[in-house]
Image (tube, grey):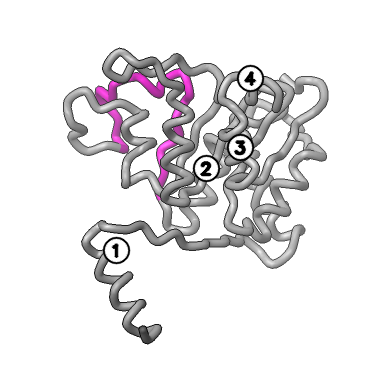
């Protein structure tokens, strides 16, 4: 069979939603660490004005390196509290994605099972529509979840399921970008979500570990 015939068949099957074609996408916000560091700090300082002299922490170097070339990965920020994980995931990352023309709704993990009542991001959500429904829908190409590990179990017709594992299933299947933060250690992630999820996280995300005293 000719390559063109294969291309036509795949294109037709994709159009009819019979198969999913996973595509690589690497983003960049600058050709050098200096450019990306300046952009990172400008966004960070404008989003959080509670500090008179914001500190640039060593962990931020890895995020800046990711900004130079994402290498088709999202971000997983994990480790000690009070060092900027949440403001980066729920603030800096959405702004960076918006600069690339991508709109995304950050979600708090403990609200995953919450019904969307009113939210300017959503237009007339279906009755009973939850943030978990959104995070596992076809519309969520980029998924932001803050404080993984604080969510409650999801009840699916009597079966209790970890909602984060559902998000991971969709992200892996459709190759979606994940932007996550957690105070859990790798061992705690393994204990709660299992080896399969831990392995997927390392495949889909650039993992940045935050270590040190809280700056709050």
Q: Earlier in the sequence, mark 4 or mark 1?
A: 1
Q: Main secondary structure of the magenta part?
A: loop
Q: Which residue lies under the disc numbered 2?
A: 178
- Residue 4, compared with residue 127, is above or below; it is below
Whole-number angstrom distance, CA of label 2 to CA of label 1: 23 Å
Label 4 Cα crowd, 10 Å radius (few <14 / some 14-19 / many 20+):
few
Whole-number angstrom distance, CA of label 3 to CA of label 1: 35 Å
The image quadrant where one finds the N terminus is bottom left
Label 2 Cα crowd, 10 Å radius (few <14 / some 14-19 / many 20+):
many
Give the residue furthest to the front: 1
Q: Which mark is residue 88?
A: 3
Which secondary structure, mark 1?
A: helix
Label 1 Cα crowd, 10 Å radius (few <14 / some 14-19 / many 20+):
few
Whole-number angstrom distance, CA of label 2 to CA of label 4: 20 Å
What stretch of residues is rendered in magenta? 103-121
Tell me where residue 186 appears, x and y as whole percent. 70, 27
- Residue 45, compared with residue 110, is above or below; it is below
- Residue 150, compared with residue 144, is above or below; it is above
Tell me where residue 123 appears, x and y as whole percent. 22, 38
Q: Earlier in the sequence, mark 4 or mark 3?
A: 3
Q: Nearer the viewer, residue 216 or 161?
A: 161
Q: Residue at x 58, y 19 (%)?
A: 192
Q: Which mark is residue 14?
A: 1
Which secondary structure, mark 2?
A: strand
Q: Residue at x 42, y 53 (%)?
A: 102
Which secondary structure, mark 4?
A: helix
Q: Quadrant of residue 82?
A: top right
Q: Which residue lies under the disc numbered 4?
A: 191
Residue 109 magenta-drawn?
yes
Q: Earlier in the sequence, mark 2 or mark 4?
A: 2
């Amino acid at each position: 069979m000719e390559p063109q015939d294969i291309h036509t068949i795949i294109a037709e099957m994709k159009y009819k939603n019979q198969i999913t074609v996973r595509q690589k996408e690497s983003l960049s916000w600058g050709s050098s660490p200096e450019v990306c560091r300046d952009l990172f700090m400008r966004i960070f300082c404008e989003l959080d004005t509670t500090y008179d002299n914001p500190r640039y922490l060593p962990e931020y170097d890895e995020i800046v390196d990711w900004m130079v070339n994402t290498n088709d990965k999202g971000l997983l920020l994990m480790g000690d509290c009070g060092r900027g994980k949440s403001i980066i995931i729920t603030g800096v990352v959405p702004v960076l994605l918006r600069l690339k023309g991508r709109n995304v709704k950050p979600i708090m993990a403990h609200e995953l099972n919450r019904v969307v009542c009113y939210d300017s991001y959503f237009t007339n959500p279906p009755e009973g529509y939850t943030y978990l429904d959104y995070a596992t829908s076809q519309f969520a190409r980029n998924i932001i979840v803050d404080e993984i590990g604080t969510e409650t179990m999801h009840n699916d017709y009597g079966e209790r399921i970890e909602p984060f594992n559902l998000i991971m299933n969709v992200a892996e299947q459709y190759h979606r970008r994940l932007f996550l933060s957690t105070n859990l250690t790798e061992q705690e992630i393994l204990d709660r979500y299992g080896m399969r999820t831990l392995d997927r996280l390392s495949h889909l995300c650039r993992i940045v570990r935050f270590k040190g005293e809280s700056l709050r």
